[in-house]
Image: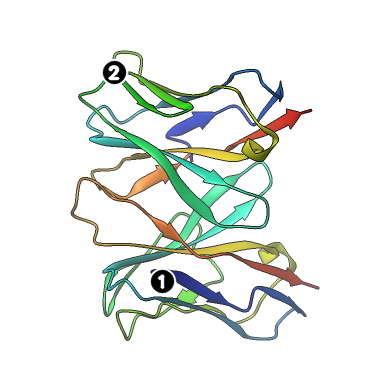
Amino acid sequence: EAQVTQNPRYLITVTGKKLTVTCSQNMNHEYMSWYRQDPGLGLRQIYYSMNVEVTDKGDVPEGYKVSRKEKRNFPLILESPSPNQTSLYFCASSLDSGSSYNEQFFGPGTRLTVL
Amino acid sequence: GEDVEQSLFLSVREGDSSVINCTYTDSSSTYLYWYKQEPGAGLQLLTYIFSNMDMKQDQRLTVLLNKKDKHLSLRIADTQTGDSAIYFCAEPSGGSYIPTFGRGTSLIVHP
């Protein structure tokens, strides 16, 4: 089944404790991205990657890191989480960034709480 | 989401029609999209329209595009409680084909 998977689905942590949220897709997609969703603010893009070893900042990159060592994986790293990073996080992928029809496939989300 | 504007909430009675509106800014958009997010889940593509079309119908869904006013709407006929979700309008912007999402409209359907 074609899908985007994220782990963990739920995470409660404390301020300053490094964490990684994994994202994997099995559709051989070139483009991957991370969003956070907050009430009243909708979806805001954190980072995106157009291909292996190519990453770039989205609208709200502060406090986050990403890496794209393999095509299928795009982990989101919070080196020193803070309470304002409490949010619902979504990973998404699409075939590439150059196609005019560009359906985004989303993971199920990761609910992160930073105490 | 600044390039794509949507109202945040819409409440309708079961069986009525729902109309969710969206305005966008990038006039060069080729495809425009509607995504649906059900409770506890990620977004899924619901429907889309190519920019040379004015209307697209798909069962209970009707998408209307007014390019002159940069206005996109999604009409759901005979709205059911299962249609309760957040609906996101999305359009490519900034010279990229990657869609930018609006803030989402929460559709609440009353029995």
Q: Nearer the viewer, mark 1 or mark 2?
A: 1
Where B82 falls versus A1 (above or below)?
above
SS type, badge 1: loop
Specify the label residue B54 is tagged with: 2
Q: Are marks 1 and 2 on the same chain?
A: no
Colour theme: rainbow
Q: Residue furthest top?
A: B68
Where A35 falls versus A19 (above or below)?
above
User: What's the residue at 48%, 51% (across, down)?
Assistant: B44
Q: Is residue B83 left or right of residue A5?
A: right
Quadrant (top left, top right, bottom left, bottom right) of the C terminus of chain A? bottom right
Residue tagged by mark 1?
A1
Whole-Å distance between the Cαs marked 1 and 2? 34 Å
Q: Is residue A63 left or right of residue A4?
A: right
Camera-nearest residue between B91 and A25: A25
User: What's the residue at 47%, 79% (across, down)?
Assistant: A75
Q: Amino acid at mark 1?
A: Glu
Q: Position of residue A100 (x, y in %)?
A: 20, 45
Q: Position of residue B92 (x, y in %)?
A: 31, 41
- Which chain is mark 2 on? B
Decide if residue B103 is in sight here: no
User: What's the residue at 31%, 85% (across, down)?
Assistant: A70
Where B69 falls versus B25 (above or below)?
above
- Name the image quarter holding residue B93: top left
- Which chain is mark 1 on? A
Q: Is residue A12 left or right of residue A42?
A: right
Where A90 falls versus B9 (above or below)?
below
Specify the label residue A89 is tagged with: none
Q: Position of residue B81 (x, y in %)?
A: 70, 35
Decide if residue A30 is in sight here: yes
